[in-house]
Structure formats: C-alpha cells, structure tokens
Image (cartoon, coloured by chain):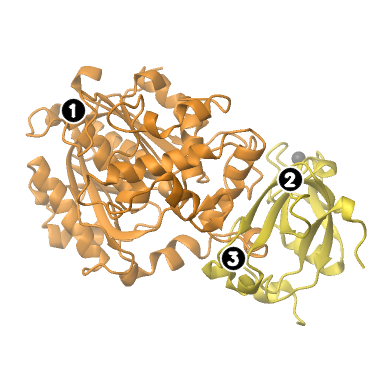
Chain colours: A orange, B yellow
C-alpha cells in the first residue's frame, strides 16, 4: 500500500562541516551543529530564523533548546528524536516528513553533530549504561565485536563469501579518492592491503570497521509544495519506514530469525510504500558500521540472496562507473567519515541533484539505509520529481 | 574476590536476569520459563509476551548446547580492558536446545579445530573475577574434550 507520505516532503538543503579525527575538532559539538544547520539553510535558500523543526536520532545532545538563540529561531514548532541509534536516520527523515506534511512545522532540520572532545560521546553517551551484563561479562562491548557475531554466522552458516566484505570496503575507499572531504581519501585499499590488515574481531579486520569522526551534517526538509519554489532540485522522500519485526529488538543475540541486518521488515515496507523494488534503484548509500553488516543490508533489501551474494557483491559491481549498484559514492561511513551515518543522507541527495563527486549518470532513485544490526532500524528511498 | 554480583551490578539491557547470575553463584545454570504457559524466556523479562503472565520460574538445567556463533577479539576494547592479557580470546553464543533454543554467551575455551558453528559444548562455571567484572561466568568447552579437572 502506498503511504500518504509518499513524496509529501523533500530534502532541499544539505550542510556538512569538515570531518576531523575523533577528538580533534577545533570547535565544540554545538558549534559544529550550528555550522551544519546554517549550511543546509544557505544551500536551500531558507533563512535560518525560519527553521521551526528539529529532529535527530538517539544520543544527539544538541537539542533545539540549545540551538535556537544562536539561530535566531522565531519559533520552535516541532522537535523530536527517533528512538534508535544509527538505525534511526531514515526514520528521522520520516518524522520530518510527517511534521511538514501535517503542518506541524514548515522547515525541519535533521542533523547529527559529534565532537568527542566536548562530550565523550562514544564512551559515555553511546556505550555506557546500555550494554547488557551478558555481553560485558563475556568480553564483548564494542559494536564491532557484537556485529562480528552476526557476520560470522552469515559467512560460516549461510555461506556468504568472506570476500563480499572486502568488496564493500574496497568500493567505499575507491569512491573516497574523488572526495576532497573524505577522511580516508589517501588510502589506496587494494587486495593486498586489505588482506594484510590486522584483525579486530573476527571476521572483521581494521578496514571492515568504521571509526567515529568529529563533524556534523544537517539536511533541511520542507513540504513538496514548498520544495518546488526553492533553488535546489528537491530529493523527495518516497518512503522511510522505521521499526523491527516480531522476534527482533534488544534481545542479546536471541533475535529470531538471527537476521543479517535486521532490515527485512523495513525494507519490505519501503518497497511496498514507494512502489519500487531493488532493481529500480540507481545508487545506494549503505550504512556500514561494519562491512559485513552492509552485506547483510543488501541481502535484507533483496538486492541479492545468500546464494548469489558472491556474484552480486563484487568491487566492479559496486563502483561508479560501470557497477549495477554503486554504493557509498562519497566514501561512506568507512572512508568519507563516520558521524553515525548522517553523511549518507547528504550523498543520497547529491546523487539526485546530479552533483556527486562520483555521480551515477541520471540517478533518479537513491537509497539510504539506516544502521544495520541495531535493535531497531529504518531505511529510506529518495527520488527525483519524475519518480513521484 | 569476595563479593556478590549485586555489589558491582552492571546497569544496561533489560535487567531481569538477576536469578541467572545468582544461579551461577550457587554453581547452577538456570534459565527462566513463564510460570503460566511454560515458554522459555531468554533474555529474561518481566512479563511473558506469549500469554501475558507476570511470573517467571527459574529452572536449573544442564549447561550444554551447540555453538551458534562466535568471534575472536584481537583488540582489547575499552570497557573490557580487563581481558587485555587474554587477547586474542573467543566469545561464543551457545544455543541451548533443552531451553527452547535460548542463546547464552560465554568465553570459549578449546581448540581452533573445534571452534565451529554446530559443535557440541559443555559449560563450566567460573567464580567472579576481575575479567568478568565481579560476575560469576560460564566458559564453554567442546564436549569432545571431556571433563576438565
Ligand atoms: Zn506465558
């Protein structure tokens, strides 16, 4: 069933600060948030004082209350948080779409700002206080380790080739070379470099794992009606469902089925709500906390199966030009920089506008998946006007 | 170390598994069922989603199962840095067939050859230590390796 929200709202502005090594930002987190939000407003041709909605996802601390005086906000009419970590980004877009489609707000920013030096986010906000004793007692604390459990079973039990992880890593680093903003743009990730990297938590090695950066990214969402009067080519939100199926949730590895990325439910709804399917997608920004989870996302979304993952997920098939599904065309979480995946939204929008550094010619349908393996997730399909 | 896990209790997750840890402290491997409909409930929770009952029953069972998945950590992550000297170490998720397929974590001790999904393992209960953050714990060893003195 098509959703009432299909195409009701669009991203009309993007703002991104430079990405810094974690802990190395010259600015505190709240200033980075302001820079990204003001950047998105300037890109959209909207006065920052007119932004009246503020949305992020779990563990964001720079709320509207702290930002409004610096933005000159006339009135905050709507503020919300998607109750999920990195899995929540497309879901946050969906909340923004609901807010503008129902008239609760007129111009909504969706954003993420991170500066480890000012808030100790990774250690304090994200990690502590929400990891079950069952993990910590048994030497497991990091998402890298916990998600390694998922990918190990995907490889060993379901027969997905280990090389698919390498293909995902190599494609992202390859795309980063053209992106002056990319944190990993100087890393040439060939087979040998990847194969010789030190192990982190099997099956992951160093290049399979994201490392948090400092930085901020914001996108501005308005109604489809208003979007048509603004200077930038709108990226319409076709569908961005959030949630999890029965058998999922915070279950300490007792998820049933023990799915690869936890996105079968949201992906199925997204295809139904948008009226499109995997074969229609021109380009995909795949959230990769870890490469194996990106592989799982592609399987959960129906781009391939466990049986043919090895044929579909190859370096050549994932890159611009020539690949049937170019992924992470800005360098993604691994090589552009990791601010909990928010940079992927900006790149998904650029592909529709036609101004990515690794542009897929004529891209009209642009996918952005939320964090895989999260206790709940979301996924989103953006489209140009002709896809409505 | 002479303390009960409650004194060093980790806050996080659902937090309905106190009886699991108390069981290990007594030397028993206990997993819960719903007191009303008998459904195995793991991780433990405060209400049975199958029938709506609020009471759990804790059952001492044999600690044996099969390896469901595993990872070998080659890096001492911050919050488990007590295990630095053990790197690389293997953490396993073990499926307990006689507990409704509940999956219970633990450290794996055994050969690399036996470290495969589906291999039968037996749990051995260890007393609290710094490595286990003051909690009692379970290590899983391949069933084929026989009893350990
Ligand atoms: Zn029950």
* Quarter containing the N terminus of chain A: top left
For the residues labelled 1 and 2, say whether their Cβ atoms are less than 8 Å apart.
Answer: no
Most foreground residue, B2 or A298: A298
Residue A193 appears left or right of A281: right
In this orientation, does residue A240 appear?
no
Tags 3 and 2 both on a single chain? yes
Q: Where is residue A315 in the image (x, y as percent from the top left)?
A: 40, 35
For disc 2, the chain is B
- Mark 1–mark 3 Cα distance, whole angstroms, equals 45 Å
Residue A13 appears left or right of A330: left
Q: Which residue is drawn at 51% across and 42% down?
A: A292
Q: Residues within 10 Å of mark 2 (few under 14, many from 20)?
A: some
The residue that label 3 is drawn on is B11
Could you say which disc has been placed on residue A235 in the image?
none
Q: Where is residue B62 in the image (x, y as percent from the top left)?
A: 89, 52
Q: Residue at x 37, y 58 (%)?
A: A212
């Amino acid at each position: 069933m098509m959703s009432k929200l299909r195409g009701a709202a669009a991203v009309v502005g993007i703002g991104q600060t430079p990405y810094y090594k974690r802990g190395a930002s010259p600015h505190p987190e709240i200033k980075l948030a302001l820079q990204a939000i003001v950047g998105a407003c300037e890109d959209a041709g909207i006065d920052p004082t007119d932004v009246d909605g503020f949305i992020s996802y779990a563990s964001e601390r720079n709320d509207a209350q702290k930002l409004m005086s610096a933005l000159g906000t006339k009135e905050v009419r709507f503020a919300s948080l998607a109750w999920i970590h990195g899995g929540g980004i497309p879901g946050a877009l969906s909340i923004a779409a609901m807010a503008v489609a129902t008239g609760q707000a007129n111009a909504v920013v969706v954003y993420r700002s991170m500066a480890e030096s000012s808030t100790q986010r990774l250690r304090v906000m994200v990690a502590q206080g929400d990891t079950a004793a069952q993990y910590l007692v048994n030497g497991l604390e990091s998402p890298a380790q916990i998600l390694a459990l998922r990918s190990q079973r995907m490889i060993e039990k379901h027969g997905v080739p280990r090389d698919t992880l390498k293909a995902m890593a190599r494609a992202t680093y390859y795309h980063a070379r053209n992106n002056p903003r990319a944190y990993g743009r100087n890393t040439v990730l060939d087979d040998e470099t990847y194969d010789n990297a030190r192990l982190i938590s099997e099956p992951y090695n160093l290049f399979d794992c994201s490392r948090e950066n400092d930085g901020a990214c914001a996108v501005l969402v308005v109604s489809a009606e208003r979007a048509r009067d603004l200077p930038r080519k709108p990226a319409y939100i076709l569908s961005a469902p959030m949630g999890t199926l029965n058998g999922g949730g915070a279950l300490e590895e007792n998820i049933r089925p023990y799915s690869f990325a936890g996105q079968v439910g949201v992906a199925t709804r997204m295809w139904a709500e948008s009226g499109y399917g995997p074969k229609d997608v021109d380009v995909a920004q795949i959230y990769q906390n870890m490469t194996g989870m990106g592989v799982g996302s592609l399987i959960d979304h129906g781009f391939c199966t466990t049986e043919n993952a090895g044929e579909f997920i190859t370096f050549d098939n994932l890159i611009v030009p020539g690949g049937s599904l170019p992924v992470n065309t800005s360098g993604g979480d691994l090589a552009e920089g990791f601010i909990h995946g928010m940079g992927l939204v900006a790149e998904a929008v650029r592909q529709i506008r036609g101004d990515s550094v690794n542009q897929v010619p004529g891209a009209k349908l642009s996918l952005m998946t939320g964090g895989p393996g999260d206790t709940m997730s979301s996924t989103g399909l953006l489209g140009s006007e002709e896809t409505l | 170390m002479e303390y009960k896990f409650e004194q060093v209790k980790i806050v996080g997750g659902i937090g309905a598994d106190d009886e699991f840890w108390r069981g290990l402290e007594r030397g028993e491997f206990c997993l819960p069922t719903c007191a009303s409909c008998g459904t195995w409930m793991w991780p433990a929770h405060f209400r049975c989603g199958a029938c709506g009952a609020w009471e759990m029953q804790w059952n001492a069972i044999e600690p044996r199962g099969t390896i469901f998945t595993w990872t070998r950590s080659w890096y001492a992550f911050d919050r488990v840095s007590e295990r630095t000297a053990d790197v690389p170490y293997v953490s396993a998720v073990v499926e307990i067939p006689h507990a409704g397929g509940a999956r219970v974590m633990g450290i794996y001790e055994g050969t690399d050859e036996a470290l495969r999904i589906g291999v039968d393992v037996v749990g051995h209960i260890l007393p609290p230590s710094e490595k286990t953050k003051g909690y009692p714990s379970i290590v899983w060893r391949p069933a084929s390796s026989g009893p350990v003195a």
